[in-house]
Image: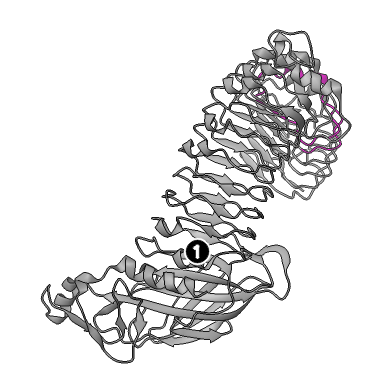
């Protein structure tokens, strides 16, 4: 027997997967503020039509209850009567897929701020009283696929800032929507069905301040949406020409027109002074871009297969991210170099793209994977911030100029680039000014003889040579890998595990990548690992095991390691061995000058003035020669 005063002082009841069909009437909830019963089997909140609490056997309102969360209660078919919840501010019923009725009393919730009905797929409509919710700020109907209309009095909801009705069956909006002067976010479309002229004309009848022609321009009602910052008309079956009056939405910051069939954007889009994001992906009939607003930062126009004219890109002077993947463009305009803020450029699978011009200097990531006819890129030497370069499956690519002069240490993906010239490999890492982690993936089947330690399979053992007055500046690790058969998937990239058996230490190294292609063609991973990665973990005489793993189904066939070293600084030498600053020191294991590679020797090497050692040239010289041998 449940005590009558159970939960009397309770403020917040969070009971996910509540095991009963309803809350017992003798739960004393008079002080409850939050009720959270997500993922429960509840079929009705309270048994009977009234909200009841135990208080001297009388019905009482739950005056303090402000939040009710019944998300994903799959057995719930009807909401409760809301008359006894006068203080309710948030009601969320997302994912209640069997809910088919919202009680008419919802219109009496004068304090309601948020109503979330997302993915209530059996809900046919909203009670007409909903327009009385003058305090409501957010109405979420996304995924309510059976809701076909909104109340005509929608415009009376004067506090509404967010209306999300994408994925519904709504084809026509009430004219009163133009009265929603505080509306900031409007999302429509996403329904599947035949082209509807009335739908198209009604959408565009919402943005014209002057014309009576519903198809080409819009009545004055929609011009009242002066606060609108986000408009999504994704997948609305919009076709033909978009009206020029779109430019009247002067506060717009985000515009999503993706997955539509229109053939042009209105020139007035350049009059949107605050527009920052524009989505146009899979607008397959869009042939060109108009002049774009200088405020634009993000442009996604992938899959626009009719796109030919990109002459107006330079007008988007604030652009930071640009995606033109899966288009049929043959080239980019030369003035793209003027987009000084561009950081990410994506050109994946552009089958007709033949070359790239000089690119903006602030680019951090360039992805031109799958551009099968591209042979050359303009010099990348000016890309001072480049971190990632994706050129996989550019089968005709011959060279990438300027990588040898980069100041950064990018990761370079060139799998399936079988046309690479040997001179390109020779110069690949020529310009690294300081040692760092450098990773590249490219065709190749043999571990170069220059590597001091080589092994078949995925593991090897080596002993660090005696270093005398030298120190390890870094190491090069490489692995030849392939799968038994080619698959159109991405798998995990490599991970190398180092175990110093002498010192009892271990550490791992793996490139910061999302994955690599699965191919049955031999490829090579080459990584230049800076000394800072394993500082104080390798000394002369240490015995080290190395193992390399890659994601299934790729197997490592061969692997190799090479250490490169430089003379310790004269100050360090003086402190340790009594040498003065201008003393010279011998080295029993290596020899290096700027014109030569590091070589492992069995005997002592000639004296070498430590002040002549150029560390950057040292590492890069060896790495250039190593890459050339691949």
Instruction: Tell me if residue 285 can be seen.
Output: yes
Q: Is residue 136 left or right of residue 391?
A: right
Q: Number of marks in the image? A: 1
- Is residue 404 in the magenta section? no
Residue at image x 35%, y 78%?
598
Residue 278 rendering spot, x and y as whole percentages: 62, 33
Q: Is residue 396 left or right of residue 562?
A: right
Q: Of 172 and 75, which appears nearest the observer?
A: 172
Q: Is residue 137 left or right of residue 389?
A: right
Residue at image x 73%, y 13%?
218
Residue 300 rendering spot, x and y as whole percentages: 63, 39
Secondary structure that dominates the magenta span: loop
Residue 4 rendering spot, x and y as whole percentages: 72, 41
Residue at image x 56%, y 72%?
524
Above/below status of 460 relative to 384 = below
- Which SS class for mark 1? helix
Magenta range: 119-147
Look at mark 1 in the image and give the residue it sits on: 424
């Amino acid at each position: 027997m449940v005590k009558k005063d159970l939960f009397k002082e309770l403020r917040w009841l969070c009971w996910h997967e509540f095991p009963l069909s309803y809350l017992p009437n003798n739960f004393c909830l008079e002080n409850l503020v939050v009720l959270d019963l997500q993922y429960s089997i509840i079929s009705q909140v309270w048994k009977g039509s009234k909200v009841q609490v135990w208080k001297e056997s009388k019905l009482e309102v739950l005056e303090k209850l402000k939040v009710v969360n019944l998300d994903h209660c799959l057995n719930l078919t009807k909401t409760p009567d809301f008359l006894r919840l006068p203080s309710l501010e948030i009601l969320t019923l997302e994912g209640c897929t069997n809910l088919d009725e919202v009680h008419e009393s919802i219109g009496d919730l004068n304090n309601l701020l948020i109503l979330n009905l997302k993915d209530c797929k059996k809900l046919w409509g909203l009670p007409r009283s909903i327009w009385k919710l003058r305090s409501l700020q957010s109405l979420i109907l996304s995924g309510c696929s059976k809701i076909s209309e909104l109340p005509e009095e929608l415009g009376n909801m004067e506090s509404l800032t967010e209306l999300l009705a994408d994925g519904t069956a709504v084809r026509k909006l009430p004219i009163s929507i133009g009265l929603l002067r505080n509306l900031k976010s409007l999302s429509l479309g996403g329904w599947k069905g035949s082209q509807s002229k009335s739908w198209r004309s009604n959408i565009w009848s919402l943005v014209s301040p002057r014309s009576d022609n519903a198809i080409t321009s819009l009545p004055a009602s929609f011009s009242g949406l002066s606060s609108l910052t986000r408009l999504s008309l994704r997948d609305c079956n919009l076709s033909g020409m978009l009206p020029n009056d779109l430019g009247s939405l002067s506060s717009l910051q985000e515009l999503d027109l993706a997955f539509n069939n229109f053939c042009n954007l209105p020139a007035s889009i350049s009059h949107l002074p605050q527009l920052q994001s524009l989505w146009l992906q899979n607008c397959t009939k869009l042939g060109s871009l108009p002049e774009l607003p200088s405020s634009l930062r993000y442009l996604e126009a992938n899959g626009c297969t009719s796109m030919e004219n990109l002459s107006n890109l330079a007008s988007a002077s604030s652009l930071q991210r640009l995606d033109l993947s899966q288009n049929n463009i043959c080239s980019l305009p030369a003035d793209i170099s003027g987009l000084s803020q561009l950081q990410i450029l994506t050109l994946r699978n552009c089958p007709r793209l033949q070359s790239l011009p000089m690119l903006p200097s602030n680019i951090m990531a360039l992805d031109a994977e799958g551009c099968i006819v591209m042979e050359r890129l303009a010099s990348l030497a000016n890309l001072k911030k480049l971190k990632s370069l994706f050129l996989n499956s550019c089968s005709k690519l011959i060279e990438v100029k300027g990588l040898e002069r980069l100041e950064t240490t990018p990761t370079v993906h060139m799998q399936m680039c079988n046309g690479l010239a040997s001179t390109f490999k020779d110069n690949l890492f020529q310009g690294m000014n300081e040692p760092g982690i450098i990773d590249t993936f490219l065709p190749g089947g043999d571990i170069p003889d220059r590597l001091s330690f080589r092994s078949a399979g995925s593991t090897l053992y080596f002993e660090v040579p005696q270093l005398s007055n030298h120190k390890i500046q870094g190491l090069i690790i490489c692995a030849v890998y392939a799968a038994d058969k080619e698959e159109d998937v991405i798998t995990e990239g490599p991970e190398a595990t180092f175990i110093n058996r002498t010192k009892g230490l271990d550490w791992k190294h793996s490139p910061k990548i999302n994955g690599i292609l699965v191919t049955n063609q031999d490829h090579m991973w080459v990584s230049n690992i800076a000394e800072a990665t394993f500082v104080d973990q390798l000394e002369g005489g240490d015995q080290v095991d190395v193992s390399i793993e890659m994601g299934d189904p790729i197997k490592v066939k061969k692997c190799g390691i090479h250490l490169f070293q430089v003379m310790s600084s004269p100050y360090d030498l003086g402190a340790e061995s009594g040498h003065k600053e201008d003393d010279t020191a011998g080295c029993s294991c290596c020899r290096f000058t700027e014109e030569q590679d590091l070589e492992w020797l069995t005997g002592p090497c000639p004296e070498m003035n430590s002040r002549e050692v150029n560390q950057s040239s040292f590492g890069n010289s060896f790495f250039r020669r190593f890459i050339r041998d691949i």
